[in-house]
Amino acid sequence: MSDRPADSAKRTWIIASGCAGAVGAGFAAVPFVSSFMPSERARAAGASVEVDISGLKAGEKLTVEWRGKPVWIIKRTPEQVAGLPKIDPQLADPASKRNPDELTPEYARNEHRSIKPEIMVAVGICTHLGCSPSDKFTPGPQPSLPDDWVGGFLCACHGSTFDLAGRVFKNKPAPDNLEVPPHMYVSDTVLLIGSDKKA
């Protein structure tokens, strides 16, 4: 009387159970392992953003996302660029000397706060409490703005105003000009937001 058929069936059952357990453990481990891997969105959050500005017309604004922040790209008209120096006396920091390393790269520490005078690149977040100002490009008297308004941005939360270079006006809650993110031109019509170092 041999117990071999019973032993064989028992052995097969143990192997099958072990394999099923291993497969189950593998499936259970996948979510934990994948949770340690950054998502596509997370990987992109710190990455540079390439923007084609060839279709941007004078007086228009384009908004892109970089590190979860809105970045404004504005093509200023020749009149808007020419008007920037005229309002220096009304601004809190016209030469962007406050917190320059934090808010304004060296190549943007000029009257227009940009590489090219006609193209403004700025993070669209008020330096007061983090609200997003609205466009007020049209000059002249308007609600919540002075009668001699020259065009720029209004943060309706607490009334901070910025010119078309992102410079804050005097006596406003915002302590600093809008941030100019690191950026560079890959070509005449393509901007790279988030990097200003050539490889």
Image (spheres, helix red, strand yellow):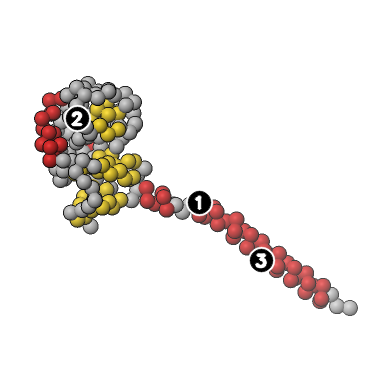
The percent coordinates of residue 162 (x first, y second) are 23, 30
Q: Are marks 2 and 3 in contact (CB under 8 Å)?
A: no
Circle 1 residue: 35
Q: What is the three-letter code of the residue carrying label 3?
A: Cys
Query: Which residue does the image show at 21% across and 32% down from the upper left?
Result: 138
Nearer the observer, disc 2 or disc 1?
2
Q: Secondary structure at mark 3?
A: helix
- Of mark 1 and mark 3, the one earlier in the sequence is 3
Q: Quadrant of the C terminus?
A: bottom left
Q: CA distance from mark 2 to mark 1?
A: 51 Å
- Of mark 2 and mark 3, the one earlier in the sequence is 3
Nearer the observer, disc 2 or disc 3?
2
Q: CA distance from mark 2 to mark 3?
A: 74 Å
The percent coordinates of residue 29 (x first, y second) are 57, 56
Circle 2 residue: 139
What number is the disc on residue 19? Answer: 3
**Camera-side residue: 148 or 70?**
148
**Camera-side residue: 19 or 177?**
177
In the drawing, does residue 19 fall left or right of residue 9?
left
Q: Is residue 173 visible?
A: no
Q: Is residue 175 above or below residue 34?
A: above
Q: What is the three-letter code of the residue carrying label 1?
A: Ser
**Camera-side residue: 24 or 18?**
24
What number is the disc on residue 111? Answer: none
Q: Residues within 10 Å of mark 2 (few under 14, many from 20)?
A: some
